[in-house]
Image (tube, rainbow, N blue to C red):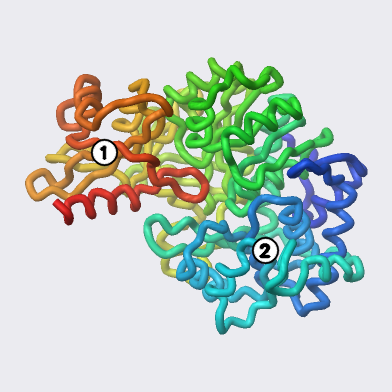
Amino acid sequence: MSDASSRPGPGEHNLAVLAEQAFARHGDYEQVFFEGRWVSSGEIHERSTRVAGGLRAHGVAPGDRVVVMMMNMPEVFVSYRAIWRLGAVATPVIFLQKVPELRHILTDSGARAAIISAELVDLFRGAAEGLDITTFVVGGAGGIPFAELEAGEPAGIEPRADDDLAALLYTGGTTGRAKGVMLSHGGLWESGRGLNLVARSTDTTRSLLPLPLSHAYGLVVAIAALHADRKPVSVVQRWFDPVGWLTLVAEHRLETSAVVPAMLQLLLAQPLAEYDLSSLRSFGSGGATLPPAVREEAEKVFGVTVLQGYGLTEASAAVSAETVGEHRPGSVGKPLPHAEVRIVDPDGNVLPAGGEGEICVRGAGVMQGYWHAPELTARTVRDGWLHTGDVGRFDEDGFLYVVDRLKDLIIRGGFNFYPRDVEDALLEHPAVQLAACVGRPDPERGEEVVAVVQLAPGRAATGDELVEFAKARMAKYKYPREVVVLDAVPLTGVGKINRRAVREIFSDKRGRS
């Protein structure tokens, strides 16, 4: 996937320049469809230049953090480009926050301004009370109207170096208080370019974007479109819902969509025969490990190629990915051009093909560090290598496989294994739509294996039945001793299993028994 001849020289990775180049390359055309209206590339470009000027007039300077907290809408694209044009730092925030979580992000980041959508005004007010943050509101009252920003004089592009900060993204906080991850212009530029090389292999241009643009994965997918050699067209969902997703694919003859595994599982539970999905050609799956059974069913039912990828916020969201030409089920592809990957044992020794150990990443996409956390940064990035906390292995041909998270390792009676083994087994049951496994503290065995499941619509199964189902398929030490059927398995805002919430379910359960 190398394409060194097209790469810019040092200091030429400014994301605002990349957006300007994309507009110059493709011109004005209908680029984004959102809730019944097409928005042209020219409109997005023109609005972003004026919003940049408006932010400058309100005192936002290069390096200032600007919070962007909206559901998906065209103004998110406009805001990001305006912030980068000004040389400020985009600080995306997923709107599924509680007041204490949001206040931590606002205070920790030292945000100078915020752009929010009208439905989030009350939440934001509660979190920002007493803080000096200039607030702009899209489509409603409660702050300075976003339209006032657009009335400003167009702004030029502020020069930025490759290592200047472009985005400050806060991790989901499922294992503790959210940490600010510092990502550079150069790192995001390279990461977007890597994903665009994957997109080129699918030969598609019409995509559906259900991912939250406030998450690293959604952000880099949007940057990847700026690298496109053909005119990219995006249909944007305000927030993912499976029926709306299917309707939009059928209506607009869409060819591809970037998703997370939980989205695929919810889509597969829908009455798919009611929709004309014949235009679909591929899915890009990331954000979490895709269970083999889900991948196989998706490829069969949708008639597509599912291309898996691997990344994390600390590595600008994209480390490896499959392409149509380099596609191996079960893997997350080969490292992208900007990323060097190795597998190491607990002592830091590099393991050969087949050896399972911690995935470590080096390259342009690796974060500059955690905001205001130098000690944590030093523990996480050592000698230029980002220690991801993920367990993986390479095969003999250089394809990467992700096993699970180191911290999620279950140790039962001296036997070590990962939750994914249990989850994959439970997902083989025809009634199970989602599954999540954790280790529950146990005085005799150290940890006991427990799981929660969400059943597919119209299906029935009891927890005891699912225990017996897994028992017949797994080693004695590994099968879950308790399975709880829930209306919905807890997920994070971007569709990952929220293991902390699952552990709390079993903690609460024990406390009530």
Identify the residue at the far left of this view: 444
Tag 2 near tag 1, CB within 8 Å: no
Circle number at residue 198 = none
Q: Which residue occupies 89% across, 42% down?
A: 25
Where residue 99 appears, as percent x and y from the top left, is 49, 69
Q: Which kind of residue does numbered mark 1 sit on?
A: Val
Quick one: 495 or 179, which is closer to the camera? 495
Where residue 308 appears, as percent x and y from the top left, is 54, 31
Quick one: 150 or 92, which is closer to the camera? 150
Q: Which residue occupies 53% across, 48% down?
A: 362
Residue corresponding to mark 2: 118
Q: How many numbered markers are drawn?
A: 2
In this rendering, position of residue 92 left or right of residue 12: left
In this rendering, position of residue 32 left or right of residue 190: right
Residue corresponding to mark 1: 484
State the CA–CA distance, disc 2 to disc 1.
38 Å
Quick one: 342 or 504, which is closer to the camera? 504
Q: Which kind of residue does numbered mark 2 sit on?
A: Ala
Chain-order first, disc 2 or disc 1 = 2
Screen quadrant of the N terminus? top right
Q: Is residue 332 visible?
A: no
Q: Is residue 371 above or below residue 57?
A: above
Q: Is residue 11 above or below residue 259?
A: below
Q: Is residue 32 visible?
A: yes
Circle 2 — which element?
A: helix
